[in-house]
Image (cartoon, helix red, strand yellow):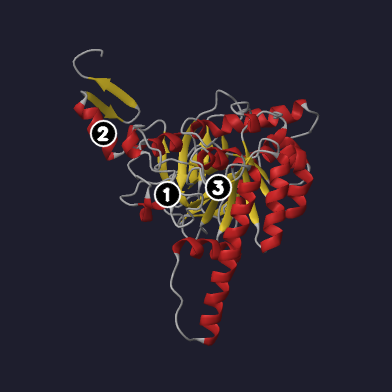
Amino acid sequence: MVNADILLKDGKIAAIGEGLKAPKKGMVVEGAGKWVTPGIIDVHSHLGNYPAPSIESSQDGNEMTAPNTAQVWAEHSVWTQDPQFALALAGGVTTLQILPGSANLFGGRGVTLKNVPGRSVQDMKFPGAPYGLKMACGENPKRVYGGKGTLPSTRMGNVAGYRQAWIDAAAYRDKWDDYEKNGGEEPERDLQLETLAGVLNGEILVHNHCYRGEEMAIMMDVAKEFGFQITAFHHAVEAYKVADLLAENNVCAAVWADWWGFKHEAFDMTEANLAIIDQAKACGMIHSDSEIGIQHLNEETAKAMVAGQRAGFAIEPRHAVAWMTLNPAKALGIDDVTGSLEKGKMADLVVWSRNPFSVYAKAEKVFIDGNLMYDRSNPERQPHSDFELGIMDAEGVRLSGSDVETQGGAQ
């Protein structure tokens, strides 16, 4: 809409229209000439699990001890003091999914967070968001474990590992179903199989690291064999080759705008990847998998939009916005409460200085649940973690909002 007002109340979007009046004690933000979008949602992040500073003792995102580590939960490694959360906030990111790494066939559970300060991960968890299971196909698992002389060392070994795990999970699920229906001796809990059974029951969403088109088709075959749904393929450099299959199977694809070529399975890329996915009526989105990329996902979305336009697709900015907001919300199972500017949804939104797809655009204000969490013009609304403040103090640097002042001259 043009020349519209947005009324936020009690953490929700209360109304959208023209001529709305704010309560007498309410905050009024003058938005003339500015753009407003839903908060950006990153479906693939490792913030908190691979925090700054990047040192070995804090690298807690990849449990590289077995091909199947479905029993681990990413939230148990999230360091809430990671300074990178605030940097992502300044880029307009209001929600993000933290995933385990991609060394294993089954990497463990991911967790969806709101980008708010918290003493513990429980303070940051997105209310009601389902868990995700991180899976990985292709080069990474076979390289990591083939290098150790164990299964898998090939792609066929990868698939054999998936299938055996799902066979075991189905037996575990059936055992518990029988117990809950008929009673008897309570089965012993198995944390690994518990997570996989949660997928089979539809309670946990599958987020699958996968680059090549034919491997995505194979993974969808495995899902059909065992009766579960793959929610999204991540990275998905060759998703354009199977875009119609993604649409038919209701599988999303989370991609980069132009990150490719760093290994063989990431080589056969087109910058129109996301646009082709979108034109096939599949659910496509931008993701980061990067502590740097998460700070400018609006620019990454702009690059994907322009690449699609150059390929001949008519893509309007108001449509491309969904690639960084509503579609990732769908992939996280939270699109009923966030991801678009609609009455009744969470008041998570960003006020931009101009068209967010301009390289000159800046997130001026970021609201989460109706609270002003970041204000580029107000140092009091530019958060820093306690860890960051302590480090800066120790190095003789005093932080005041976005201004960094070095005491005692330049260093």
- Residue at x 24% of width, y 31% of height: 391
Specify the farthest residue to the front.
149
Q: Is residue 342 visible?
A: no
Q: Earlier in the sequence, mark 3 or mark 1?
A: 1
Tell me where residue 308 sits by quadrant: top right
Q: Position of residue 98 (x, y in %)?
A: 47, 46
- Residue type, mark 3 in image: Leu
Q: Residue at x 44, y 70 (%)?
A: 189
Q: Position of residue 285 (x, y in %)?
A: 63, 41
Quadrant position of the C terminus in the picture: top left
Q: Which mark is residue 151?
A: 3
Badge 1 amino acid:
Gly
Residue 5 on image: x %, y %: 57, 45
* Mark identifier at residue 1: none
Q: CA distance from mark 2 to mark 3?
A: 46 Å
The mark found on residue 26 in the picture is 1
Q: Name the residue carrying label 2.
A: 389
